[in-house]
Image: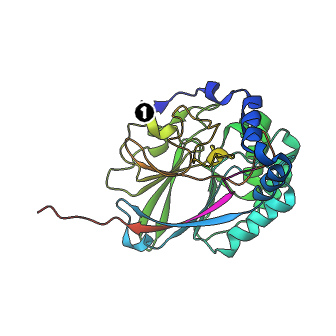
């Protein structure tokens, strides 16, 4: 069974250690640095990438996917900011909207208002999402109620087929690695090696142990791009078993390519340094086929 066991131990790191490291990075000008960190936490960046997807039907070439993850509505991420995220996503007019988990922070009271805002998200191919570790911590039932109320289709160890002019694209999702039970085989079911497959997983660590070769691209969040990053490009805290590998951006895992978004909200501290919040817009392209000489 191609499943990945949950292991929250790496996530239960001493948050004080993270905050101390973050403050140390601001030490040369603590007050100004903290003020900048607060500013950067709301300095939303749209990143655009054209990504070749193996076996992509020509009918899906040019399909745009907006990826929103780690909103963390709560004490550090205002509802006004969530509405800004939604308006920004809609302004891009994506064909498909994907949500990568961790919708609230610290208290379940933030879940309902967050999904009331997310209910405005609409796209021709639909809106789909997965769960993150914070969704288990702060109210799993409430989060699932939010999915239903906002017409967000949950992809926990399951897949759906997106159709366009008779062609199909497989969109799959898996459970959270720390708090749930990841089951890639169940998520993909009878999907064939010749199908185009896009997988949604909150935690990018899933890709490191995934033996299944059917996934063409995996989208993840969870790391916040480090949230606070040193000038060297390294982050003092990355909630991953694999150090800096899955910090952000494109990563080649053993069996698939992964894109790790820096996410939209914050945890542990209300600021970002060197890791602006990110709303990702991906344009799917056909994989270039190279003939052997």
- 206 or 45, which lies in front? 45
SS for callout 1: loop
211 sits left or right of 6 in the view: left
Q: Split into 4 quadrants, where in the image is the N terminus?
A: top left
Task: Please state, as top left, top right, bottom left or bottom right, where the C terminus lies in the image.
Answer: bottom left
| Above or below: residue 32 compared with residue 47 | above
Residue at (47%, 31%) from the top-left corner?
3
Residue 215, given in percent of the width and then of the height, sits at 41, 49
- For the residue pair 273 and 129, the one nearer the viewer reads as 273
Q: Which residues are magenta?
A: 272-281
Q: Main secondary structure of the magenta part?
A: loop
User: Seen from this angle, which residue lies furthest left?
Assistant: 293
Is 269 contained in the magenta span? no
Tell me the quarter of the picture where residue 167 sits: bottom left
Q: Residue 202 lies in what quarter of the image?
A: top right
Q: Nearer the viewer, residue 169 or 8?
A: 8
Q: Is residue 257 left or right of residue 260?
A: left
Task: Report x, y in % for residue 280.
Answer: 60, 62
Q: Look at the picture and state if 79 lies above or below 229.
A: below
Q: Position of residue 287 (x, y in %)?
A: 34, 64
Magenta highlight on residue 278: yes
Q: State the residue in front, 149 or 132.
A: 132
The residue under the point 85% across, 39% down is 107
Q: Which residue is mark 1?
A: 2
């Amino acid at each position: 069974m191609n499943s990945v066991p949950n292991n929250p131990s790496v996530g239960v790191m001493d948050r004080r250690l993270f905050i101390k490291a973050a403050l140390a990075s601001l030490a040369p000008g603590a007050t100004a640095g903290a003020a900048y960190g607060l500013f950067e936490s709301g300095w939303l960046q749209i990143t655009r990438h054209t990504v070749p997807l193996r076996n992509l039907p020509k009918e899906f070439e040019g399909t745009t996917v907006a990826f929103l993850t780690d909103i963390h509505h709560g004490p550090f991420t205002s509802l006004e900011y969530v509405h800004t995220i939604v308006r920004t996503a809609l302004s891009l007019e994506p064909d498909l909207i994907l949500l990568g988990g961790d919708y609230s922070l610290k208290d379940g009271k933030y879940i309902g208002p967050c999904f009331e805002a997310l209910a405005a998200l609409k796209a021709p191919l639909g809106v789909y999402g997965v769960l993150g570790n914070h969704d288990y911590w702060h109210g799993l039932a409430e989060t699932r109620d939010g999915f239903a109320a906002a017409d967000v289709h949950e992809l926990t160890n399951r897949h759906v087929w997106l159709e366009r002019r008779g062609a199909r694209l497989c969109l799959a999702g898996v459970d959270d690695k720390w708090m749930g039970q990841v089951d890639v085989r169940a998520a993909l079911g009878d999907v064939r090696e010749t199908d185009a497959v896009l997988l949604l997983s909150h935690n990018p660590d899933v890709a490191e142990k995934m033996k299944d070769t059917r996934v063409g691209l995996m989208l993840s969040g969870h790391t916040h791009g480090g949230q606070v990053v040193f000038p060297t490009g390294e982050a003092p805290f990355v909630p991953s078993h694999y150090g800096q590998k899955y910090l952000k951006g494109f990563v080649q895992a053993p069996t698939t390519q992964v894109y790790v978004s820096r996410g939209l909200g914050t945890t542990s501290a209300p600021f970002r340094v060197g890791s602006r919040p990110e709303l990702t817009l991906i344009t799917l392209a056909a994989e270039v086929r190279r003939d052997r000489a």
